[in-house]
C-alpha cells in the first residue's frame, strides 16, 4: 500500500516529529525512504559569481553529511533509506523530488508557532500542500519535557 516515502528535512528541531512519524510508517509498511534536503537559492541571473557557487557547494556538502547520518539511523532500524540534496525553491524542490522519486507520501515538519515570524504567510509546508501530487503529512515537533 505504501512503498516509498519522501521525508523533507531542514535539520531543525521542528523536523524531529516528521522523522519519528516517517520511521513508524516506514517500519509498519516496509516502505523505503528518500530523505531530502532542499537548499533555498537566490533568484539571480544566469551569471552567478564563483563565490556564490562555492557557497552553495559548501551547503550541499554539509547537507549530504547530515543526511548520511540520518540514512544510517534509518538503516539501523531496518528501513531502506537514501539521501537527496537539491537546490532551488524549497517547496518546489520537495514536490519535484517526490514526483521524480515516485514517492507515495511526503512527510515534513512544521515550526513551532513561536518560531515563526508574526503574520507569516506561505510557509513551505503550505505551498507543498497546495501543489503536491501525493498526500502529505505535516508533523508537529516532538514535545520537549
Image (cartoon, rainbow, N blue to C red):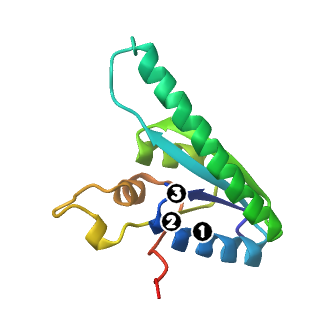
Q: Please, is residue 50 above or below residue 18 in the view?
A: above
Q: Secondary structure at mark 2?
A: helix
Q: Please, is residue 128 above or below residue 85 in the view?
A: below
Labelled pair 3, 2 in contact (Cβ < 8 Å): yes
How would you rate the neighbour count of disc 1 (Cα within 10 Å): few for under 14, some for 14-19, many for 20 or more? Answer: many
Q: Nearer the viewer, mark 3 or mark 1?
A: 3
Alpha carbon distance from label 1 to label 2 = 6 Å
The answer to which of 102 and 81 lies nearer the viewer is 81
The answer to which of 34 and 114 lies nearer the viewer is 114
Q: Which residue is mark 3?
A: 11
For the point 33% across and 27% down, the residue is 43
Q: Please, is residue 72 above or below residue 58 in the view?
A: below
Residue 3 numbered mark, or none: none
Q: Earlier in the sequence, mark 3 or mark 1?
A: 3
Q: Which residue is mark 1?
A: 19
Q: Which residue is mark 2?
A: 15
Residue 16 seen in the current view: yes
Alpha carbon distance from label 3 to label 1 = 10 Å
Extreme residue toward the bottom, this view: 145
Labelled pair 1, 2 in contact (Cβ < 8 Å): yes
Q: Secondary structure at mark 3?
A: loop
Residue 119, image x and y in percent? 16, 62
Residue 101 seen in the current view: no
Relative side of 30 to 139, left or right: right
Alpha carbon distance from label 3 to label 2 = 6 Å
Q: Please, is residue 44 above or below residue 126 in the view?
A: above
Amino acid at each position: 500500500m505504501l512503498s516509498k516515502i519522501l521525508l523533507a528535512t531542514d535539520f531543525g528541531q521542528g523536523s524531529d516529529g516528521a522523522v519519528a512519524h516517517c520511521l513508524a510508517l516506514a517500519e509498519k509498511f516496509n516502505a523505503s525512504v528518500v530523505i531530502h534536503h532542499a537548499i533555498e537559492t537566490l533568484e539571480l541571473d544566469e551569471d552567478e559569481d564563483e563565490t556564490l557557487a562555492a557557497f552553495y557547494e559548501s551547503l550541499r556538502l554539509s547537507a549530504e553529511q547530515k543526511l548520511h547520518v540520518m540514512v544510517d539511523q534509518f538503516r539501523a532500524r531496518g528501513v531502506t533509506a537514501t539521501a537527496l540534496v537539491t537546490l532551488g525553491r524549497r517547496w518546489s524542490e520537495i514536490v519535484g523530488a517526490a514526483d521524480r522519486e515516485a514517492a507515495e507520501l511526503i512527510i515534513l515538519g512544521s515550526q513551532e508557532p513561536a518560531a515563526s515570524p508574526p503574520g507569516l504567510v506561505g510557509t513551505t509546508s503550505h505551498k507543498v500542500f497546495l501543489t503536491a501530487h501525493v498526500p502529505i503529512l505535516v508533523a508537529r515537533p516532538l514535545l520537549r519535557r
